[in-house]
Image (cartoon, rainbow, N blue to C red):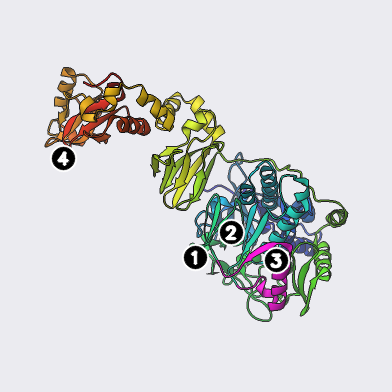
Amino acid sequence: MHETPSRHFDVAIIGGGFAGVYCAQQVLKRLGAERLRVGVIASENHMVFQPMLPEVVGGSLSPQHVVNPIRMICDGADVLKAQVTDLDLTNRVMTLDGGRFTPAVKVSFDHLMLAPGAGVDLSRIPGMSEHAYLMRTVGDAMKLRAAIISRMEEANLINKAQQRKEMLSFVVVGGGYSGVETAGQIQDLIVGVRRYYDNIEEGEASVTLIHSGDRLLGMLGKRLGDYTGSCLAKMGVNIVFNKRVRAVTARTVQLNDGTTITSHLVVCTVGNAPHPLIKALGESGAVPLERGKLVVEATGQVKGLEKVWSAGDCAVFPKADGGCCPETAQFAMRQGALIGDNIFASLRKLPLKPFKFTGLGELATIGHRKAVAMVMGLRFSGLLAWFMWRSVYLMKLPGLDRKLRVMMEWTFELFFPRDINLLTPSFSSPLGEMHLEAGDSLFRSGEPAQSLYAVKKGCVEITDAQGQIVKSAVAGEHFGERALMGDGIWRFDATAKESSELVAIDGGTFKTLVKSIGSLESLFKSTAQQYHLPEEIQKTVDAISESTRSATAADVMTKNIASLDAALCVQDAVEEFQRHPHSTYPVTEDGKVIGLLRRSVAYDWLKNHGLTCRDGLKDLPLTTPFCVRGEVLVPELVQTLMRTGVSKAVVMDAERRLLGMVTVFDLLKGAR
């Protein structure tokens, strides 16, 4: 039984960006007093004026001044803050997810405008999605600014200059508008606020801009592109041309030529991808796609579909003078307004208008009261271009109140220092994923412990102060519990042996789980025992008698132990349990150890398979034994047992034949 839609829109607009908002405004304006329902469905209840996001990062503007409530600027529209989870173009019904506590909502429509923007995909660069900051929403800009100030605060506490330089190394990936403007604003911010941090020396903070091309802002031509690069370089920004990022780790950025840049903060302004909703429609064959974008006519109508329109970053919109429109605000605004006119014309059975706008020019600010501009074929740079940039975008801001607020804030910024308050609340996720390349350090001895780590892929070596391997953690294993359950300080170094993927559980969540689930506490207390410091191991060795310390495993082992032949069935094993009660029994085949059988496992097997089953011991889940050679010396044996966290070891000869078993208790009570 299909659920009846809860409401109907004559015009439904998906997307709250420039294209969607300007379409809604134009439709409402043309409809006037007519009672047709216009709905705007957006993931946020505000429109972000994205060209000004870098100014939020640099502290030139407050975050609330670059956003506008859609309900206020689209007065008369029904605004729904929700994600579209399903879109049926045949029946003209969409399903919305409004949040955690809202049931799915179905909405029907007549005309549909698709303007959800572009998606983002950083998965092509290992580690980028885990470690990089984005510049797409006002939340991204606030988070990035808070991270920069936080790095300044942390660096101010560090006494070693080299560590401060590593902490204050900022990398921006991408030499387009967003990358150039963000790099310039970060540089302006750290230069402007450094004087308030007594322990940070001039030149210790650095901003590096990585660009795959040979010139920044290639769309503005060689002269302005070169001017942009020279201005950023004079400001102190390091520019890396003709390089691509190969991988990003917690502490490094690795380039395709093998170069490694140490950095604790990476900003990614590249990685556009098809929006998931548009991609799903294309894969189902409902809409025509080209390079993951909707193919539209010059009128804004999706090719081959009636009453379906699209504009903005998700559409391949033909330009009047040939080619396709660039993904910029000035084009998205006019595309949206045109579609608003054409939807009204379609409702009135009037001819549709084609898109004729070819662009007024391009503007980009590079910080420090400098900008570059190409307007009506004329090129400008420096202070004049900066003034033009601010004037143009001030006029484009929707709403008089926003214009006045931004103008006042820009004026204050000319005379007063930038705000360095760290006010962004922390919305930490209890789980985080990270990527490490071979040789990358995860943590060092003496640093505060903040997470439990689980290895998804690869290998991480835990080493002590002497460089000896305490544990090689591979896929499926974890580490870090000893520090979290102790004094919260790492006592070992952790380094990736190869390219690795980890899952980090923050310390607060770990402690809550351990306190709440008794079995977890027992498990982690047991596994924590393998992380023994060299002095702890030596203390145990010193407690052993002198004669035992010079002995071998074969000298101190228990020789006459009960073992089971692999040819036996589970019933025979139970009889052996009764004659020789132990918790664990070595299982041998032709005299060679193939595994350990726990008595509890055998009993569980009988309960699940019936008391009359005659299954062989090979069919049971045997535990892989921890084995040592008989000639191993006792001090080495003690270290091995303590570092592996096992309570006993099987002693074998060179052919893996069973000789006996040994425990730490055997060592402490002396040689046999």
Q: What type is the residue that disc 1 sits on?
A: Gly
Q: Do we see residue 311 in this rendering? A: no
Q: Name the residue nearer the viewer: 555 or 511.
A: 555
Is residue 318 at least partly visible in the picture? yes
Q: Nearer the viewer, residue 478 or 151?
A: 151
Mark 2: amino acid: Gly
**Residue 647 appears at what percent x and percent y?**
32, 27
**Viewer-nearest of labels 1 and 3?**
3
Which circle, 2 or 4, is nearer the viewer? 4
N-term mark: 2 or 1: 2
Q: Which residue is mark 1?
A: 285
Query: Type of residue at label 3?
Result: Ala
For the residues labelled 4 and 3, the Cα–Cα distance comes to 67 Å
Residue denoted by label 3: 233
Q: Give the side of residue 194 with respect to residue 481, left or right.
A: right
Q: Residue at x 28, y 18 (%)?
A: 669
User: Which residues lie in the magenta part?
Assistant: 214-243
Q: Is residue 388 above or below residue 121?
A: below
Residue in front for this viewpoint, 243 or 505: 243
Name which of mark 3 and mark 2 comes first in the sequence: 2
Q: Is residue 560 above or below residue 183?
A: above
Image coords of residue 308 (percent x, y): 62, 65
Q: What distance separates the C-alpha of mark 2 from that of mark 4?
A: 59 Å
Kindly state the secondary structure of the residue where label 1 is placed.
loop
As measured in the structure, the alpha-carbon distance from the residue carrying label 1 to the one carrying label 3 is 49 Å
Residue bearing the label numbered 2: 119
